[in-house]
Image: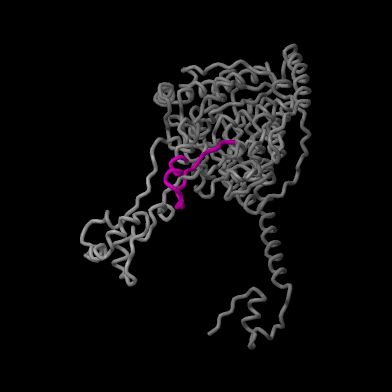
Amino acid sequence: MVSETVQASCVTNGGTESNQGFKRKHLGSDEHASASCHNGSDAKGDIGTSGLDLTANVDEDTQLDNASKKVRLPKELTLQDMYNNQDAFDEDDEDDSDWEPVQKHIEILKWFCTNCTMVNLDDVFHCDICGEHKESGILKHGFHASPFLPEVELIQAESEASARDKDFWSEASASNCSTAVGFDERMLLHSEIEMKSHPHPERPDRLRAIAAGLAAAGIFPGKCCPIPAREITLEELKMVHSSEHIAAVDLTAQMFSSYFTPDTYANEHSALAARLAAGLCADLASAIFSGRIKNGFALVRPPGHHAGVRQAMGFCLHNNAAVAALAAQAAGAKKVLIVDWDVHHGNGTQEIFDQNKLVLYISLHRHEGGKFYPGTGAALEVGSNGAEGYCVNIPWSRGGVGDNDYTFAFQHVVLPIASKFAPDFTIISAGFDAARGDPLGCCDVTPAGYAQMTHMLSTLSGGKLLVILEGGYNLRSISSSATSVIKVLLGESRVCESENAVPSKAGLHTVLEVLKIQMNYWPNLSSSFEKLQSQWGMYSVENKRKQAKQRRVFEPPVWWRWGRKQLLYHILTGGHCHLK
């Protein structure tokens, strides 16, 4: 939870002296608040002579003896008299500041949800957006922490987990570990220095929440082994990025705070974090392909799939997936498959391999006709310069896409193309911002859905699979989703095979659009396209029948159509009445 104080001004009836104390206490200011009192003697300009005549009529002796009393006034006064003699109506022993508006500062407390970063008022204990408690223990226990209760010390559970960790750690050290996790705490130093009106969604807490969830489950440290972190070399980066881009990222190490784009920040530690992330991904790819480990999960940041050859953008500095793909090829892999299920299109990865027939890039993302960030990734973007068909985009036309649509797309597009490509190594750009509850993605994929997709891809390339963290900004969602994915890598998760996933109407339309384009490059898709096209026609007819049936719940007499109830007839039957 992040708290912040907001100053607000209001008009109140209070003394000047007490107002000064309030301001110093809460704002830490030594300035004195002042209240202005305007009276007739202070006024300047032509105010008339009524005031002078009135003063002359007052008995001088009475005025001296009763200095503390009101000046005696004639019974009949004009408005001009009253205006010019405001002091005469007040007793000297009374403070008229009670009647003057005084500017007074009050503080309104608000807090930002640790889970989703949304803002809430201080008197609210649960986030209005995600329902997380303001003192949630998600950073300490991951998704295992209760979203409804404040942080609770899980002493017994933690001690049991600690005992399990020791056993698993010794086992992992003694034998060959099958699943490795790449992580280094120095990547947490990459953060936005300039505090704006809202916390940046790509924040260090993302890694903390995932790591806490894995630790609480006894997975890492425990069942998964670590790999030592190293910084990627300049030579390795030059295989992906231009020298100008690399120099621009390195230059941020000399700056306290900087920005590549309005949403892509850097601080003095960001260049190191980016090199560590890329180095971990490269070493994991090499270790997996060489057989030292079976598979791995790169728990890294900053993310990378928006970083292109010459630019950093979309929270990304270096393209980790591209670095890993080239590292796998350097280790001996000929063909590499990259599946990007981040809710945003990986425009950087697509650009890097746009003309490469040895790297097949498949992306599932929100597109909405180019209105969703970054605007690229239309189905017609298929690769270029002889590599047409080696870029496959599955662009969702709306938000709210869930497990069924993703599974359906995997069954009819991703797996048929990937199987025909026959990769030697598979990489998942695993952004979890399509997860249920994500504030940026606004989709509906569950941890079980991510586990299902991971299981499907693990059947390719002999199980040589590397999962690289990309986006995902709801801590509870990314913690639970990452844990589900790693359980599949460990072989612990029981994934239910979904042979006939039923898509939404929009999802089916998107898959048909992609198949129609890609079957020009992958002929094995033709049969699937024809089959689905017939189902699409039946689906449309069935929907029309259902709509017609709903409209005919009440069937009016047919003669109403030509009588005085013509309008009512057309309303009830769903028709359109054209009255002359």
Q: Quadrant of the N terminus?
A: top right
Q: Considering only vertical position in the picture, is 214 above or below 46?
A: above
Q: Closer to the camera, 480 or 507? A: 480
Which residues fall within the magenta stretch? 1-21
Residue 549, percent from left and from top: 72, 69
Residue 445, percent from left and from top: 66, 42
Residue ID at (65%, 27%): 211
User: Does the magenta run of residues contain 14?
Assistant: yes
Q: Is residue 527 visible?
A: no
123 vs 348, left or right, is right
Residue 37, percent from left and from top: 34, 52
Residue ID at (78%, 20%): 164
Q: Closer to the camera, 278 or 383? A: 278
Q: Colour scheme of this structure image?
A: one colour
29 vs 131, left or right, is left
Q: Closer to the camera, 395 or 353? A: 395
Q: Closer to the camera, 12 or 16? A: 16
The mark tally for this picture is 0
User: Does the magenta run of residues contain 545?
Assistant: no
57 vs 101, left or right, is left
Q: Is residue 50 visible?
A: yes
Residue 55, percent from left and from top: 26, 62
Q: Considering only vertical position in the picture, is 169 above or below 459?
A: above
Q: Residue furthest bottom?
A: 563
